[in-house]
């Protein structure tokens, strides 16, 4: 599939129209001669969009001319660079046939012209055309449009197919739904396993103990990079492929830097999903409120929009014990201008480039830490009664149901309301960076996953795994994920694509945050101890939220526990 279901339907309708028109001409004009180039091109493009294999025989059969004539025309199309052949067997005696990028680009230009010709000659008004947004694939015509996914020149040679381990979130589930399209493009089967975040980390470490990796590619939560590299679990990216093949400059800076440890990349951003504040634009407008930019403004808005008597609450956030609340605290600490480690301040944030060799200590029991803890205590008053068990998905589901006026949430969760026309938040959600407190500035803490190659992968599988990794993270693939429901994107080029921008206001908003240097990953520095630090903060602050200990006590206990797990790294 080269686009969203709607766009795919429209492109296929254009193909059907041209084929039907060609058939009509043949029936009207007695001396009409079919154009084999045209008919075979339509057949190739339709099959490519539908992920169907085209053989030389089936392509010749679509030409509408005698076999020998059609065979010569196929050879001419190959010589002209319009058609590509890919071996189907090890002997190379049989081939599948695919449209080249040159042919696809020509088709994009043609389908774009179809709309303009129809408007010009049949007096279809611009207003009517825009209202229906019926463009016969013209979204691909823009110079910035990303073309459809291309098939590899040769199928991957991987025994048993490509084996992938991922997180069970909406973006990776879109990948699973598109498995047939990727299998067609790679020429190999794909076997994907998905786990929750904690089980994923366990499986990655369990897999590292095997003599040979069970997986060719694994998804890694960005804060885990340092730990997994130090344990020898990840292969350096430059050991598997030339990083220039990925176009590193195209990735959002924060997402690309987050895949590095010790100056080397160990993965490719598959999701760059900042945590933002989602807010109901309609409710804010009714109350005469502006989107909050500070923590004080957020608390004021939450107070005004909090209406428990009518089943509506001011704010939702991660407050469940352990990992969920720990993430919230680290990001809230960043809102008050401080990382959880004693990182050196640099232009635009804090230095994370030397974590592999510079000494560091936890900074939890500080004045900024107390301000962050007090802020979380204040949020309780305007939160739903079940807030202390609310985690990743639970904070967005009630927002999508219209029960919450604001919610902190990763962009990957936006499909819960953006793709549900029945949701009160559908089309009524605004996106802004985290409101900041004293000492802070606007920030959108970066989350998401990188796709990496395990260090213990069998050597003969590395090259094919690298090719699959490049395809899974390519602009063409990222656009495909978005068109099928994902709301994460790690690349500037994809954000600039006209069809992507039409799909959601998230992409333009996040792109702007990246250019303003608001996307940052220092709130969760990827040191080996970060997962334990997050868990510790989530446990101690949960006792605080329950009223069992004071904020100062919670910070003191968390600080002591964090100090005990950070090794003496002052040498």
Image (cartoon, helix red, strand yellow):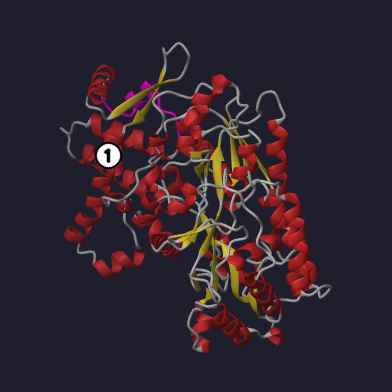
Tell me residue 463's x, y (percent): 49, 25
Task: Tell me if residue 403 can be seen.
Answer: no
The image quarter containing residue 330 is bottom right
Tell me residue 356's x, y (percent): 57, 43
Determine the main secondary structure of the stretch shown in magenta: loop
Towards the viewer: 258 or 178: 258
Towards the viewer: 125 or 409: 409
The image quarter containing residue 496 is bottom left
Q: How many marks?
A: 1
Please give the range of residues in magenta. Answer: 51-65
Tell me residue 204's x, y (percent): 68, 38
Q: Residues within 10 Å of mark 1 (few under 14, many from 20)?
A: few
User: In the rendered view, does 63 fall on the left or right side of 237?
Assistant: left
Question: Looking at the image, which residue is at 51% across and 80% down?
Answer: 282
User: In the rendered view, does 342 fall on the left or right side of 81?
Assistant: right
Question: Looking at the image, which residue is at 45% across and 30% down?
Answer: 241
Towards the viewer: 428 or 432: 432
User: In the rendered view, does 327 fall on the left or right side of 436?
Assistant: right
Task: Tell me if residue 91 can be seen.
Answer: yes
- Check the image and report above or below for 376 versus 259: below
**Which quadrant, please, contains the N terminus?**
top left
Q: Is residue 563 magenta?
A: no
Q: Is residue 54 magenta?
A: yes
Q: Residue furthest right?
A: 548
Q: Secondary structure at mark 1?
A: helix
**Which quadrant, please, contains the C terminus?**
top right
- Check the image and report above or below for 298 versus 358: below
Tell me residue 252's x, y (percent): 43, 52
The residue where tag 1 is placed is 23
């Amino acid at each position: 599939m080269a686009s969203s279901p709607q766009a795919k339907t429209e492109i296929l309708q254009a193909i059907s129209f041209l084929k039907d028109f060609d058939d009509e001409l043949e029936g009207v004009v007695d001396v009409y001669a079919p154009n084999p180039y045209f008919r075979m091109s339509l057949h190739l493009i339709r099959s490519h969009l539908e992920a169907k294999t085209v053989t030389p025989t089936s392509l010749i059969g679509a030409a509408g001319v005698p076999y020998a004539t059609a065979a010569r025309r196929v050879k001419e199309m190959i010589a002209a660079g319009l058609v590509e052949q890919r071996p189907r067997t090890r002997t190379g005696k049989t081939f599948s046939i695919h449209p080249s990028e040159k042919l696809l680009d020509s088709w994009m230009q043609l389908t774009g012209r179809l709309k303009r010709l129809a408007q010009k000659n049949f007096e279809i008004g611009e207003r009517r055309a825009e209202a229906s947004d019926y463009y016969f694939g013209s979204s691909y015509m823009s110079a910035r449009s990303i073309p459809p996914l291309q098939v590899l020149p040769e199928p991957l040679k991987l025994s048993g197919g490509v084996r992938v381990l991922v997180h069970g979130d909406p973006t990776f589930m879109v990948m699973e739904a598109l498995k047939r399209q990727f299998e067609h493009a790679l020429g190999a089967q794909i076997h994907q396993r998905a786990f929750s975040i904690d089980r994923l980390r366990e499986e990655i470490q369990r897999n590292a103990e095997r003599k040979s990796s069970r997986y060719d590619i694994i998804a890694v939560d960005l804060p885990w990079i340092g730990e997994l590299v130090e344990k020898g679990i990840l292969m350096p990216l430059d050991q598997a492929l030339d990083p220039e093949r990925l176009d590193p400059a195209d990735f959002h800076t924060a997402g690309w830097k987050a895949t590095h440890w010790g100056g080397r990349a160990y993965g490719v951003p598959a999701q760059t999903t900042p945590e933002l504040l989602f807010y109901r634009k309609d409710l804010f407008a009714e109350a005469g409120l502006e989107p909050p930019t500070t923590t004080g403004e957020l608390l004021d808005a939450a107070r005004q929009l909090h209406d428990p008597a009518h089943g509506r609450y001011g704010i939702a956030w991660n407050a469940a014990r352990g990992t969920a609340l720990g993430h919230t605290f680290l990001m809230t600490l960043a809102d008050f201008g401080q990382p959880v480690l004693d990182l050196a301040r640099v232009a635009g944030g804090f230095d994370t480039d030397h974590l592999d060799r510079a000494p560091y200590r936890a900074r939890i029991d500080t004045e900024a830490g107390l301000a962050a803890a007090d802020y979380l205590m204040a949020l309780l008053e305007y939160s739903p009664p079940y807030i202390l068990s609310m985690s990743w998905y639970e904070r967005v589901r009630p927002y999508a149901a219209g029960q919450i006026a604001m919610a902190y949430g990763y962009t990957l969760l936006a499909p819960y309301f953006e793709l549900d026309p029945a949701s009160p938040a559908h089309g009524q959600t605004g996106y802004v960076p985290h409101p900041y407190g004293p000492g802070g500035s606007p920030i959108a803490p970066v989350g998401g996953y990188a796709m990496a190659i395990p260090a213990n992968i069998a050597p003969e599988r590395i090259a094919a795994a690298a090719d699959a990794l490049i395809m899974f993270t390519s602009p063409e693939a990222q656009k495909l994920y978005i068109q099928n429901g994902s709301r994460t994107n790690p690349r500037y080029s994809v954000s600039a694509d006209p069809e992507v921008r039409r799909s959601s206001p998230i992409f333009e908003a996040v792109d702007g945050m990246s250019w303003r240097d608001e996307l940052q990953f220092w709130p969760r520095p990827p040191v080996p101890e970060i997962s334990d630090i997050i868990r510790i903060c989530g446990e101690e602050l949960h006792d605080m939220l329950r009223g069992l200990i004071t904020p100062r006590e919670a910070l003191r206990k968390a600080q002591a526990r964090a100090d005990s797990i950070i090794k003496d790294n002052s040498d």
